[in-house]
Amino acid sequence: MEEVKILFIVNPAAGGGKALKVWTKNIYPILEKKKIEFDYLFTKKPYDGFNLALEGIKKGYKKIVSVGGDGTVNEIVNAIMLQDIIDPIEISVGSIGSGSGNDWGKSVGIPTNFEEAVINLQKDNFILQDVGKVSYIQKGVEKTRYFVNVAGMGFDAEVTYRANKSKKRLFGKLSYSLILFSVLFSFEDPYVEIKIDGKKVYENQALTLNVGICRYSGGGMMLTPKAKYDDGLFDITVVDKISVGTILANLRKIYDGSFINHQAVKTFRGKSIEITSKEKLYLEADGESLGDSPLYFEIFPQRLKVLSG
Ligand SMILES: Nc1ncnc2c1ncn2[C@@H]1O[C@H](COP(=O)(O)OP(=O)(O)OP(=O)(O)O)[C@@H](O)[C@H]1O
């Protein structure tokens, strides 16, 4: 079988510089040692992942691998889904998780060991996963974005927005925790209405909402713990307005997903979701802050070829 040349797209800024180190010290030497056919490009600014992937597809690359976090994967996937040069399913995407949040790879079985991950890329083992598309408003203009992992609204999106804005990468998790607590004490729960597959299922003040294709997000949290990446359905988790005390008492349960058993948590499944809110409801998808409501989600079953274990 003829070996397909891999295009690596490296986000040197991901993980506060971790991805650059991983590329230089780990991945590049393994690729050379194993005499793997590859090319690589570095992103210089946000959205370069999209543009470089698009250029790569035009040049005929069919295996594109992200070296960075989930945000870099998201940009590459958007290029794959939006181009009309070849059927998206003929392109496969891989990831060397080296950002601050590498949650997507956990759900789809991408090895965390670099050598194993590279060996995997050489093989043609893949899974087909569902892809989500969300419409939202950004600065008064309607936009759409594809996503592969989890989208968050309300509290979740507010924390992501502030974390993305924060330059305090030096303290990693600590700064994220500080942001989380500051949002916790200032957050005003929006009043939201949710329709799933055309039917109203929820109307109340909500703390946070998540729409998941995969299970992990936010650095190991399980906000949609029962999501299956190829079942053609979104898993939706909504948390009612609750006290700060209740949030703090249940924080640990976010990491094993058992928080969904709490009476203030509602879970749903569906193919399309409409979310409206009286207040501005912020949206993030795959850890990227995107815009605000009204929101419309639709799912494309098994539309993405993922190089997996
Ligand atoms: N060269 C660059 N300099 C600065 N930002 C960049 C560069 N290339 C890409 N980006 C942006 O970096 C962001 C984060 O990327 P990614 O998620 O891969 O890394 P991360 O460190 O894991 O971040 P996150 O904490 O969001 O998961 C993306 O929004 C992307 O557009």
Image (cartoon, rainbow, N blue to C red):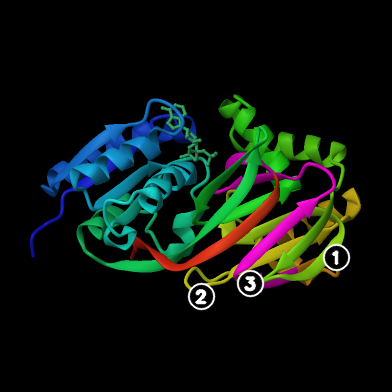
What residue is rendered at 58% in x and 69% in y?
227
Residue tagged by mark 1? 264
Q: Residue at x 35, y 61 (%)?
A: 306
- Percent from the top left, x then y, of residue 87? 30, 60
Give the percent coordinates (x, y) of residue 41: 27, 33
Q: Which residue is mark 3?
A: 270
> What type is the residue that disc 2 sits on?
Asp
Q: Is residue 168 visible?
A: yes
Tell me the crowding category of disc 3: few under 14, some 14 to 19, or many 20 or more residues within 10 angstroms, Cα based.
some
Q: Is residue 204 left or right of residue 42?
A: right
Q: Which mark lies nearer to you, 3 or 1?
A: 3
Question: Residue 231 has which mark?
Answer: 2
Please check the rendered image and state whether residue 27 is part of the magenta-colored stretch, yes or no: no
Q: Secondary structure at mark 2?
A: loop
Pick the residue in front: 149 or 202. 202
Q: Main secondary structure of the magenta part?
A: strand
Left or right: residue 13 versus residue 199 is: left
Q: Secondary structure at mark 3?
A: strand
Find the magenta span and give its range: 267-292
Q: Quadrant of the C terminus?
A: bottom left
